[in-house]
Image: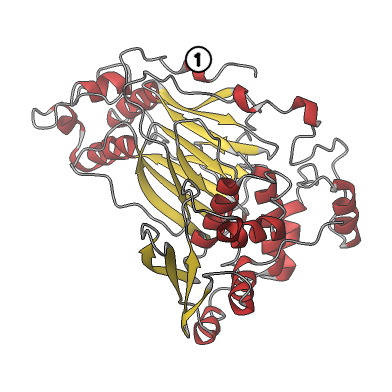
């Protein structure tokens, strides 16, 4: 049996104190430096990657990439950046040719820890029934039978007669090969450079004009009531992953934050089970016709644009390795027209995705362990404009938006040039129905 994965913050500080890693040491009582030599340098040795390899071993990732120094470093960087509540980078000397390194400040001292304890704690008696009381059909780990037994011993009610794991059960032979991942066309002119981000590195706002573009998205990640990440991105493609970037795919890489900033041990345990099953996670694609998703790995994902508090809302589980439409722009525009004519309710455009738990099921969203919300800002802009200024504003010359068009593509193109290619289904080939 492998050892449990340690908490990164305490693990890292212990490594700093050992003095066993060249260049990893304290520079002040509350600051330490980490060697950060680029792998492409000719003088890069095993010693330079020692701390990155050590975390790959401690986190259990070494078996996935036993000889990949770049992946060791990415794994370490994600874990470090995820802990912005604990560590803050104060110097980036990674480009220094003589001594490349980064300096981090320990910002969550013992005094601050006491302050954290006054925050709204998670009730132990509440969390486990909340996760499993509706049914135990969505279990997370390969040891699902052990988990069922544990839950039954806690008196959490009967199991569903038709048990389905929270994660897909498939053998190694069914996993798609690396070259089978969606690969962007090399000559596609509008592709953005590959980017990756881990929690703690929030990009600057991308909105430079009052009107958002088609690719402007507000993305937030929530672990129960705690908002872990909130950022505004400008990208046609987004990968939501957990330390498992899909190499060779042009997308903004957003790593789920670690649980090190959480307080409740049960919440941490069950959230980690979901995170470890997310892996390559989910791709989101913004096309001219709508927003689409592609689930890559075992963790079940439920998505909806409906009001999550509605008990009769139908849970929609995303199938694996299949492109699924999450939001249809034409439907949104038609609903917006009806809303303005007082013939319909306010259109829904916030995409809510729940990882590892059935959703929506009528329970409060803040009870869910991992929730991602994606808001296309052009939809929010049109909706708010319609609410604040009335129907006449949608036809005014200063706005130049023709709500009579049948799709958001036409609606936006009448206002400003699109960032997308001419063919509205240009990317359909990126997501075949089967891998």
Residue at 38 percent across and 55 percent down: it is: 202
Placement of 28 over or under 120, stated as above or below: below
Residue at 27 percent across and 45 percent down: it is: 206
Which of the pair 314/7 is nearer the observer?
7
Q: Position of residue 434 (x, y in %)?
A: 64, 17
Q: Quadrant of residue 261?
A: bottom right
- Residue 242 in sight: no
Q: Position of residue 20 (x, y in %)?
A: 63, 73
* 257 on left or right of 415: right
Which of the pair 313/75 is nearer the observer?
75
Q: Quadrant of residue 163?
A: top right
Q: In the rendered image, which residue does mark 1 sit on? A: 429
* 25 on left or right of 157: left
Which of the pair 325/144 is nearer the observer?
144
**How many residues crowd around disc 1 within 10 Å: few (fewer than 14), some, or many (20 or more)?**
few
* Rendered-image quadrant of the C terminus: top right
Q: Position of residue 257 (x, y in %)?
A: 54, 56
Residue at 79 percent across and 26 percent down: it is: 173
Q: Position of residue 413 (x, y in %)?
A: 23, 21
């Amino acid at each position: 049996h492998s050892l449990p994965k340690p908490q990164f913050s305490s693990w890292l500080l212990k490594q700093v104190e050992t003095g066993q890693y060249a260049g990893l040491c304290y520079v002040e009582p509350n600051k330490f430096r980490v060697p950060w030599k680029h792998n492409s340098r000719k003088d890069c040795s095993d010693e330079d990657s020692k701390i990155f390899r050590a975390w790959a071993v401690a986190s259990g990732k070494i078996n996935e990439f036993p000889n990949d120094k770049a992946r060791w470093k990415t794994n370490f960087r994600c874990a470090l950046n995820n802990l912005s509540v604990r560590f803050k980078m104060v110097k980036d000397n990674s480009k220094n040719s003589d001594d490349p390194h980064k300096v981090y400040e320990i910002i969550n001292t013992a005094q601050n820890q006491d302050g954290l304890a006054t925050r709204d704690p998670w009730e132990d008696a509440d969390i486990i029934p909340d996760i499993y009381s509706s049914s135990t059909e969505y279990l997370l780990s390969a040891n699902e039978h052990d988990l069922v037994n544990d839950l039954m011993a806690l008196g959490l009610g009967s199991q569903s007669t038709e048990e389905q794991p929270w994660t897909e059960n498939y053998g190694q032979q069914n996993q798609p090969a690396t070259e089978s991942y969606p690969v962007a066309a090399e000559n596609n002119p509008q592709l953005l450079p590959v980017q990756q981000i881990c929690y703690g590195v929030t990009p600057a706002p991308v909105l430079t004009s009052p009107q958002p573009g088609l690719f402007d998205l507000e993305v937030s990640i929530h672990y129960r009531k705690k908002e872990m990440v909130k950022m505004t991105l400008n990208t046609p493609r987004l990968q939501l992953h957990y330390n498992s970037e899909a190499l060779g795919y042009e997308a903004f890489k957003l790593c789920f934050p670690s649980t090190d900033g959480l307080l409740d041990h049960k919440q941490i345990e069950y959230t980690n089970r979901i995170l470890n099953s997310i892996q390559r996670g989910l791709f989101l694609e913004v096309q001219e016709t709508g927003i689409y998703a592609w689930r890559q790995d075992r963790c079940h994902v439920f998505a909806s644009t409906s009001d999550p508090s509605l008990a009769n809302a139908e849970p929609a589980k995303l199938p694996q390795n299949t492109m699924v439409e999450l939001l249809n722009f034409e439907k949104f525009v038609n609903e917006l027209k009806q809303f303005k004519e007082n013939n319909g309710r306010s259109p829904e455009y916030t995409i809510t995705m729940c990882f590892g738990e059935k959703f929506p099921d009528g329970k409060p969203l803040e009870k869910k362990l991992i929730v991602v919300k994606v808001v296309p800002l052009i939809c929010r802009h049109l909706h708010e404009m319609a609410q604040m200024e009335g129907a006449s504003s949608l036809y005014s010359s200063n706005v130049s938006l023709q709500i009579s068009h049948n799709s958001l593509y036409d609606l936006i193109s009448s206002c400003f040039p699109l960032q997308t290619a001419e063919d509205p289904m240009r990317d359909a080939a990126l997501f075949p129905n089967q891998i």
